[in-house]
Amino acid sequence: MGINWHDYIVEAKRCLVTNGTLIIVETTKSLDERLSDLRATLKENLFEIYQEEIRDRFTFIEATKRDLNLIQR
């Protein structure tokens, strides 16, 4: 991901339908410092992480876009 990775998440929120899946694959080394920020940004943008896995040198994150109305109930 580029330095403007936050913009990518916002764009994914705009483009994906409710219950759409966002898949992020990034080298584990580059995510080490910003993983907590990435999780927080996903949550702020209505994504729920349902799988996070480290395989070899890569971290795989799968998240689902949730409906704001369902979250607030």
Image (cartoon, rainbow, N blue to C red):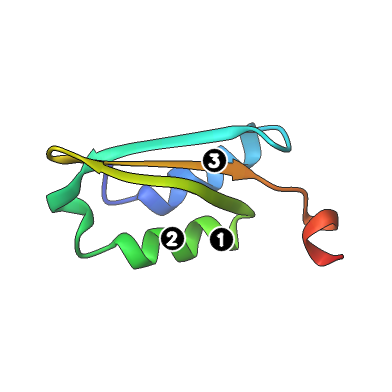
Relative to 13, is 35 on the left or the right? left
Residue 39 marker: 2
Relative to 15, is 12 on the left or the right? left
Which amino acid type is marked by label 3?
Glu
Discs 1/3, front: 1
Residue 29, relative to residue 8: is it above or below? below
Query: How many residues crowd around disc 3 within 10 Å: few (fewer than 14), some, or many (20 or more)?
Result: few
The quadrant the C terminus occupies is: bottom right
Disc 3 and disc 2 in contact, CB within 8 angstroms: no
Q: Position of residue 46 (x, y in %)?
A: 64, 54
The quadrant the N terminus occupies is: top left
Measure the C-alpha gap from mark 1 to mark 3. 14 Å
Disc 1 and disc 2 in contact, CB within 8 angstroms: yes
Residue shown at 78% from the left, 56% from the top: 68
Badge 3 is on which residue?
11
Q: Position of residue 30 (x, y in %)?
A: 16, 51
Q: Position of residue 2 (x, y in %)?
A: 27, 44
Dot 3 or dot 2, earlier in sequence: 3
Dot 1 or dot 3, earlier in sequence: 3
Query: How many residues crowd around disc 1 within 10 Å: few (fewer than 14), some, or many (20 or more)?
Result: some
